[in-house]
Image: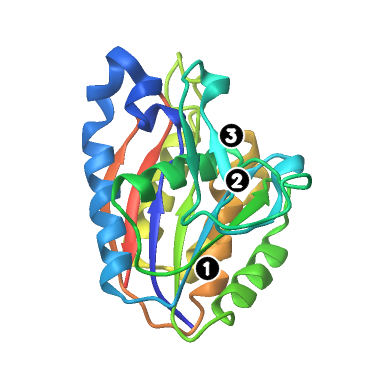
Amino acid sequence: MLVAAAVCPCPPLLVPEVAAGAAPELDAARAACTDALGVLAAARPSLLVVVGPAERSGRGVLPEGSRGSFRGFGVDLDVRLGRDAERDTESERELPASLAVAAWLLERTGWSDAPIEGLGVGEPLEPERCIRTGRDIAARAERVALLVMGDASACRTLKAPGYLDERAAPFDAEVARALGTADVAALRALDAELAYELKASGRACWQVLAGAAEGAGLGGSLLYEDAPYGVGYLVATWS
C-alpha cells in the first residue's frame, strides 16, 4: 500500500557540479527536494520505489545498487541507487539520467530508511498502462513510498528547449494543482499527446503515481513551483 510519495524534478542541473556557476539558481528547488524526502522517511516505508522517465534502453526495473553517472554532462561524478549490492556486472544497465538525479538526492540526504528499487518509465507508455504499473507497485509491500521524478512542460519561454507554447503555462498550472492536492483523477486525465507536444517528461510517472495512490487517501502539498529555464519544475509531497 502506498503510504507516501514525493514528486521532484529531474534536470541534471539540480546537481551543483553540473550546474557549475548557475548552481545557486536552483537552491530553492534542492531545499524543497530535501524536505520532500524527509516526508518519505517520516512515513517509515518498508520499500522505496524511485520512478523516472527513461529512454528505451533504460526502461524497466533497476535493482538497489545500480549505478549512474554525470560524465555525459562533463562532470566526473558517479552515483548509485541505495546500498551497493552484488550483481551481474556484465548485464548491469546504467541508471537513466532521471534516476541518477534521484540517486544523487538520496545520497545527499543520507537515505537509509528502506530498501530502494528503481523503475525507468518510457514516455510513450499509455495512461492505462501507467495506472496498472502504479497499482502493481503499491501492492509490492505493506508500506510503499514513491519518489517520482519528472519535469513539467519545456515550452514556457522563447528560450525554453521546446520554444514558447501558449498551452504550456495552463498545463503546468493544472499539474501543479493536481500534485499539490493529491488529485488522482486529474492526474489520470492528463492528455498524453499534449504532454508529449509540450515535452513534459513527468507525465507517465505522475500517472504511475495516480495508479499507486488509488484508495490510499493521501493528502498533497506543493512545496515548489517555478520555470527558471523555461521548463516547469515542481516539488510536491503526498502523505
Q: Is residue 116 visible?
A: yes
Dot placed on the residue nearer the N-terminal end, 1 or 3: 3
Asked whether the beta carbons under mark 1 and mark 3 sit within 8 Å of each other, the answer is no
Say few, some or many: other residues with alpha carbon within 10 Å of mark 1 (under 14 / 14 to 19 / 20 or more): many
Q: Position of residue 99 (x, y in %)?
A: 53, 45
| Residue assigned mark 1 | 210
Which kind of residue does numbered mark 1 sit on?
Answer: Ala
Q: Position of residue 74 (x, y in %)?
A: 50, 15
Which residue corresponds to the image point at 60% horizontal and 45% vertical from the top-left? 53
Mark 1 or mark 2: name the one nearer the start of the chain.
2
State which mark lies toward you, 1 or 2: 2
Query: Which residue is at a point 51% across and 40% down the rendered structure image?
Result: 100
Residue type at mark 3: give it: Lys
Name which of mark 3 and mark 2 comes first in the sequence.
2
- Where does the image place residue 39, in percent across and percent down from the top left? 27, 65
**Nearest the camera: 131 or 17?**
17
**In the picture provided, is 108 more to the left or to the right than 13?**
left
Residue receiving disc 2 = 53
Asked if 126 appears above or below 114 in the picture, the reply is above
The residue type indicated by label 2 comes to Pro
Quarter of the view holding residue 219: bottom left
| Of the two numbered discs 3 and 2 in the rendering, the one whose residue sits closer to the viewer | 2
Evaluate whether residue 228 shows in this view: no
Q: Are marks 3 and 2 in contact (CB under 8 Å)?
A: no
Secondary structure under tag 1 reads helix
For disc 3, the marked residue is 199
